[in-house]
Image (cartoon, rainbow, N blue to C red):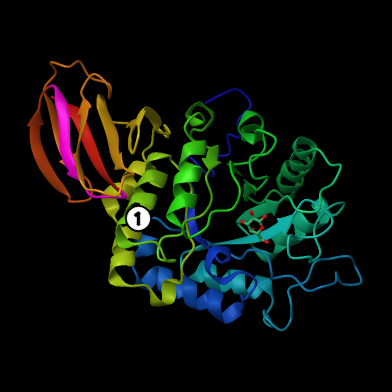
C-alpha cells in the first residue's frame, strides 16, 4: 500500500453490493430498494459477500429545503432516507447514496458544490455507509480539490463511509484518488453490450499498479443480467473479479434467472475478486482475439489465470507456465473455477478449450 492511502480499513477488499443505476436509471423508489435488499438476502447474495445497497441519481427532490438540506423526493421515498437506511441495516446490509460534486447531478437535480460538509453530515445522520460522488456540471473545477473536500467532509462526520469517486477516469484519478477515496471510476459508463465490456477491459490493462487494499480502480458497475449472453455475463463477471473491481450488481435482483444468480454468487470467482492480497490482474498477453490475464493471490505461489477468447469461434488456448509466474519445468496444480473442479497436475503449459466470448478462469498453484 502506498504512503498516504486511506487506512480506515473500510474497503480492504473491493466493495460489493448493488446500485440502482444500470437497470433502473431514475425510476427508483422506496419499494424497489427494499425489495432489492430483501432479494439480496434471499438469493444468497448477502452470504456471498454483497453488502451495499446503493441508490444512484434520481433520489433527491428538485429543491433543497429551507435550511439548505437535500431532501428525498417525497413521491419516491415518502418514508425518508433515514427510515430506509434503518430497514436495510436490519437486514444485515449497508446503505449507499449518490450525489454530485458540481452544481447539478447528471440528471439535473440538486448537487453538492458548496454544500459538501452539510450534505456529508446529513448522510451520516441518516445512517449512510457509502457515498458515490459524480462529476457532472463541474465546469472549471479541479477534481482533486473537490474530492479532497469530500474526503474531509466525510472524515468530519466521524461516521465510516466509503467514498466512491466517479470522475470517469478523465484526470487520471488512479494517480491521486487513492489518498482520498476507496474507489474511483477509470472509464465512461458501461453499457449492457459486449463491445462496452471489452472496451472498458482494454482500458484497465495499465492500471494494475494503482489499486490495492483500501483503494480500488473501478471499471464501473456490473451489467450481469442486463442483456449480455450467458457466456458474456460470465466473462464480464470473471474479468471484473480478475481486476479486483468493486462488484456492484446492476440488475433487477427481484426477478433474476437462476443462471444470473449463479454467476453473481459463484463463490470461487468472488473469492478471486476478494482475495486478501488485493492484487489487480495484469494482461500478460494480447494476440488477436486472445488475451491472458494473471493475478497473484494471497496463498503462496498461487495465481489466478484468465484465458479470454474474444473471437467468434471456440478455440483451444494455451499459456506457458513461465508466462504466468512459474518456471516452465515446475509442477503445478490447476483448478477450473467456473467448473469448480480440479484439473490435476500440469507442467510446461496450461491448455483449455474456451468458447467464443468466454474466459476460462484457472487457479494455479505450485506443488
Ligand atoms: C454518470 C455516472 C453513472 C450514473 C449517472 C447518473 O455520470 O457515471 O454511473 O451515476 O451519472 O446520472
Is 284 on the left-hand or right-hand side of 185? left
The magenta stretch is 348-357
Q: Residue furthest right?
A: 66
> Where is residue 359 drawn, in percent x and y?
29, 45
> Where is residue 221 drawn, in percent x and y?
51, 54
340 to 36, vertically: above or below: above
Locate residue 112: give its quadrant: bottom right
327 to 219, vertically: above or below: above
Is 221 on the left-hand or right-hand side of 301? right
The reply to whether residue 181 is visible in this rendering is yes
Q: Which residue is mark 1?
A: 232
Is 144 on the left-hand or right-hand side of 47? right
> Where is residue 29 drawn, in percent x and y?
62, 78
Which of the two residues, 208 or 318, is positioned nearer the viewer here?
Answer: 318
Residue at the spot x=42%, y=68% of the render?
A: 40
Which of the two residues, 16 or 128, is positioned nearer the viewer here?
Answer: 16
Which of the two residues, 168 or 152, is positioned nearer the viewer here?
Answer: 168
Q: How many marks?
A: 1
Residue at the spot x=34%, y=62% of the render?
A: 229
Locate residue 274: give its quadrant: top left
Q: SS of the residue at dot 1?
A: helix
The reply to whether residue 9 is visible in this rendering is no
Residue at the spot x=52%, y=43% of the render?
A: 11
> Where is residue 278 drawn, in percent x and y?
42, 35
The magenta stretch spans residue 265: no
Which of the two residues, 124 or 192, is positioned nearer the viewer here?
Answer: 192
Amino acid at each position: 500500500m502506498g504512503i498516504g492511502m486511506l487506512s480506515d480499513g473500510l474497503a480492504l477488499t473491493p466493495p460489493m453490493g448493488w446500485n440502482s443505476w444500470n437497470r433502473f436509471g431514475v425510476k427508483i423508489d422506496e419499494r424497489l430498494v427494499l425489495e432489492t435488499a430483501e432479494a439480496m438476502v434471499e438469493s444468497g447474495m448477502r452470504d456471498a459477500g454483497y453488502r451495499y445497497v446503493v441508490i444512484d441519481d434520481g433520489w433527491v427532490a428538485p429543491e433543497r429545503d429551507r435550511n439548505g438540506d437535500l431532501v428525498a423526493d417525497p413521491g419516491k421515498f415518502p418514508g425518508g432516507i433515514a427510515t430506509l437506511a434503518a430497514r436495510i441495516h436490519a437486514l444485515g446490509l449497508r446503505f449507499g447514496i449518490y450525489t454530485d460534486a458540481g452544481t447539478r447531478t447528471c440528471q439535473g437535480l440538486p448537487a453538492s458544490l458548496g454544500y459538501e460538509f452539510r450534505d456529508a453530515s446529513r448522510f451520516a445522520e441518516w445512517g449512510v455507509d457509502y457515498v458515490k460522488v459524480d462529476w457532472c456540471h463541474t465546469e472549471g473545477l479541479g477534481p482533486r480539490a473537490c474530492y479532497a473536500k469530500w474526503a474531509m467532509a466525510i472524515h468530519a462526520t466521524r461516521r465510516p463511509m466509503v467514498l466512491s469517486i466517479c470522475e470517469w477516469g478523465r484526470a487520471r484519478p488512479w494517480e491521486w484518488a487513492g489518498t482520498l477515496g476507496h474507489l474511483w471510476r477509470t472509464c465512461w459508463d458501461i453499457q449492457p453490450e459486449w463491445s462496452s465490456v471489452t472496451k472498458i477491459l482494454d482500458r484497465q490493462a495499465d492500471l494494475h499498479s494503482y489499486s490495492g487494499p483500501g483503494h480500488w480502480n473501478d471499471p464501473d458497475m456490473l451489467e450481469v443480467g442486463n442483456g449480455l449472453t450467458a457466456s458474456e455475463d460470465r466473462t464480464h463477471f470473471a474479468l471484473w473479479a480478475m481486476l479486483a473491481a468493486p462488484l456492484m450488481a446492476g440488475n433487477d435482483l427481484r426477478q433474476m434467472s437462476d443462471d444470473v444468480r449463479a454467476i453473481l454468487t459463484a463463490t470461487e470467482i468472488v473469492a478471486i475478486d476478494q482475495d486478501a492480497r488485493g492484487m489487480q490482474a495484469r494482461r500478460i498477453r494480447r494476440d488477436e482475439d486472445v488475451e491472458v490475464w494473471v493475478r497473484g493471490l494471497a496463498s503462496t505461489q498461487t495465481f489466478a489465470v484468465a484465458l479470454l477468447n474474444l473471437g467468434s469461434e471456440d478455440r483451444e488456448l494455451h499459456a506457458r507456465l513461465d508466462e504466468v509466474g512459474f518456471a516452465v519445468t515446475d509442477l503445478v496444480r490447476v483448478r477450473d473455477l467456473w467448473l469448480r473442479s480440479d484439473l490435476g497436475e500440469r507442467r510446461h503449459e496450461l491448455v483449455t478449450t474456451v468458447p467464443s466470448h468466454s474466459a476460462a478462469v484457472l487457479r494455479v498453484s505450485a506443488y
